Amino acid sequence: MAQPSNRQELRDYCLRQLGAPVLEINLDDDQIDDAIDDALQYFRERHFNGAEKMYLKHQFTDADITRFTSENETVSTAAPDAATWENRKNYLEIPEHVFGISKVYGISSNFVRNSLFGMSNQYYLMDLFSYSSGTGLAFGGVDMVNYYMVKQHFENIDMIINTGSLVGYRFNCRQDRLYIDIDPMRVTKDQWLLIDCYRALDPSTFGEVFNDTFVKKYATALIKRQWGQNLIKFNGVQLPGGVSMNGRQLYEDALNEIKALMDASSSTYELPPLDMIG
């Protein structure tokens, strides 16, 4: 099938691209599965269509409160001076399919955004109409350009002092732990936390992942590389009819295809990194 919708159809598609069933593909089933797994992993981690932005919510439980307020865990290390280090247990378990977290909301000191006495609300209630200049882009007598600039200034203040609704955190997708860097006394039971994150698409749920152009080409190239690696040791062996095997050429062709796909991935299929300017 030219449009695979599951793992088996993608497997068959890749083998047909390499010449099966006309040619015998000298690979073990586990090697083919490993190549497909590697292709899907790369797609989820590096391709903008391999993940979705979503919001996860978590309600603090008694176990969370106990862990946040418990004694620190000690870690002994031989470097640099065989000292004993302490690490707080201020973390939440995160599902393994989450590989990136952008923001964490829910624990705030209400400095800029929230509450009646926050800077933003006070500006709107008391000073908004005094900023109208009567010129430029205005709505109801309000200078929207100036209002927008003041709001941006409030956001800068909030980012610098970090006392708004954003929460200081640390996250590494290989740990599956979200560390919340706040005073543990600010955490209460049944309090909600909102996590702005990126989640990898599950191919078993979203079958169109198997039909993605990049996935099909990359999985085929990985299988081809493994096939060539298997045949390298038979390089130059004469077959009946005077045909000689050239596994190294097959292997090098696959390497070139993989490199071209990875270059295209970094320039075409990945979101550009965002720089902080100012």
Image (tube, rainbow, N blue to C red):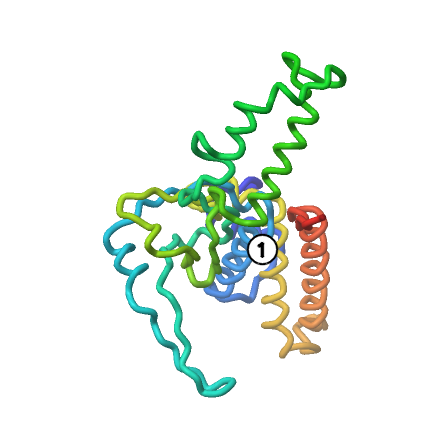
| Residue occupying image coordinates x 68% and y 56% | 262
According to the picture, the residue beneath numbered tag 1 turns out to be 219
**Residue 8 in the figure: left or right of residue 46:** left
Residue 234 visible in the snapshot: yes
Q: Position of residue 202 (x, y in %)?
A: 44, 46
**Residue 101 in the figure: left or right of residue 231:** left
Nearer to us in this view, 71 or 123: 123
Q: Residue furthest left?
A: 62
Residue 9 visible in the snapshot: no
**Residue 137 in the figure: left or right of residue 74:** right
Location of the N terminus (image quadrant): top right
Above or below, comparing residue 217 to residue 127 in the picture: below
- Residue 255, by quadrant, is bottom right
Q: Position of residue 2 (x, y in %)?
A: 57, 41
Nearer to us in this view, 272 or 66: 66
Number of numbered discs on residues = 1
- Residue 237, by quadrant, is bottom right
Mark 1 packing: few (<14 Cα in 10 Å), some, or many (20+)? many
Above or below, comparing residue 126 to residue 120 in the picture: above
| Residue occupying image coordinates x 63% and y 36% | 152
Q: Position of residue 205 (x, y in %)?
A: 42, 41
Q: Position of residue 261 (x, y in %)?
A: 68, 54
Nearer to us in this view, 150 or 258: 150
Three-letter residue code for mark 1: Ala
Mark 1 residue element: helix
| Residue occupying image coordinates x 53% and y 66% | 27
Q: Residue furthest top?
A: 140
| Residue occupying image coordinates x 71% and y 73% | 244
Above or below, comparing residue 164 to residue 74 in the picture: above
**Residue 241 in the figure: left or right of residue 122:** right
